[in-house]
């Protein structure tokens, strides 16, 4: 007697991976005129590089067991207070967020291995957030953040330039406080060059508000060194 689907184990990585179902795999194989994945490998992988023996690997384990082993290894580390600053600090992460986003393989495993970040998964998370906001508010539109603070700052600078152009009085200078995170300033400098903008970095007290070319300013509080005075 076959085990009902609702009794099948779910504590395995494959059940949390967005891959094809058995029916979908058979349909794709039938389209190719093949009977099995092994036959597909035989037809596509050159014989001279094919391994003809079983891999010496341990039996697969459930996700819970693997996570427990990883946590036990990590427990050997001494956890110290982070003093690096520059926006990097500890934070409280709700369990529902950790489990359903950060520990959810569907945010990253289906993407190509050469991607440096799980950008598509993060974008999907933002879409889900916007959808939730529209459901709660009943509004037709909802805003969402960009991928990171530095990108948001660079896009804000570009927006200031676009607004000045649309008004007929283009302004090509932007001021960023030296109290901003260095990684934020670096991205803004990279973005400013192709836009034809001049990014000036300095103390907030030195801002020249009378400058007719000033398109906008970026301030940060608390400062990158944690100063709140």
Image (cartoon, rainbow, N blue to C red):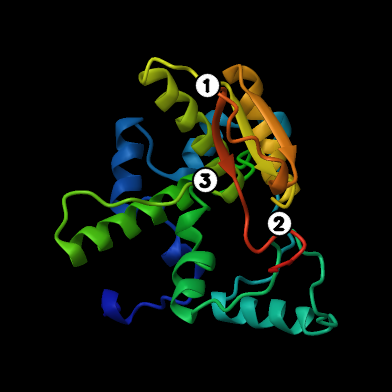
- Provide the secondary structure element on which disc 2 rests: loop
Q: In this view, does 180 lie to the left or right of 78?
A: left
Residue 92 visible? The answer is yes
Mark 2 or mark 3: name the one nearer the start of the chain: 2
**Residue at (36%, 77%) from the top-left corner?**
8
Residue linked to disc 3: 119
Rendered position, 117 above or below 84 = above
Question: Which one is closest to the eye, mark 1 or mark 2?
Answer: 1
Q: Nearer the viewer, residue 47 or 64?
A: 64
x and y percentages locating residue 166 in the rendered image: 36, 20
Gap between marks 1 and 3, in whole Å?
A: 32 Å
Mark 1 or mark 3: name the one nearer the start of the chain: 3
Question: Which one is closest to the eye, mark 2 or mark 3?
Answer: 3
x and y percentages locating residue 16 in the rendered image: 44, 65
The residue lying furthest to the front in this view is 210
Rendered position, 13 above or below 123 = below
Rendered position, 91 above or below 130 = below
x and y percentages locating residue 106 in the rendered image: 45, 58
**Residue at (73%, 52%) from the top-left corner?**
179
Gap between marks 1 and 2, in whole Å?
A: 64 Å
Rendered position, 191 above or below 74 = above
Residue linked to disc 1: 171
Mark number displayed over residue 55 = 2
């Amino acid at each position: 007697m076959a085990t009902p689907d609702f009794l099948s184990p779910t504590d395995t990585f494959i059940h949390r991976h967005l891959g094809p179902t058995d029916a979908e795999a058979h349909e794709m194989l039938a389209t190719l005129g093949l009977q099995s994945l092994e036959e597909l490998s035989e037809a596509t992988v050159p014989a001279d590089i094919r391994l003809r023996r079983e891999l010496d690997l341990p039996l697969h384990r459930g996700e819970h067991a693997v996570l427990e082993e990883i946590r036990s290894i990590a427990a050997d580390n001494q956890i110290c207070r982070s003093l690096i600053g520059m926006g990097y600090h500890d934070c409280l992460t709700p369990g529902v967020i950790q489990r359903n986003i950060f520990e959810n393989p569907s945010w990253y495993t289906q993407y190509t291995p050469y991607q440096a970040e799980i950008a598509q998964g993060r974008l999907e998370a933002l879409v889900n957030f916007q959808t939730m906001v529209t459901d709660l508010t009943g509004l037709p539109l909802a805003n969402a953040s960009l991928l990171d603070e530095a990108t948001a700052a660079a896009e804000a600078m570009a927006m200031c330039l676009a607004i000045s152009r649309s008004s007929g009085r283009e302004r090509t200078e932007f001021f960023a406080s030296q109290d901003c995170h260095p990684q934020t300033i670096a991205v803004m400098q990279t973005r400013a060059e192709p836009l034809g903008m001049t990014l000036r970095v300095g103390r907030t007290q030195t801002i020249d508000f009378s400058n007719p070319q000033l398109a906008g300013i970026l301030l940060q509080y608390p400062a990158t060194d944690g100063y709140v005075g």
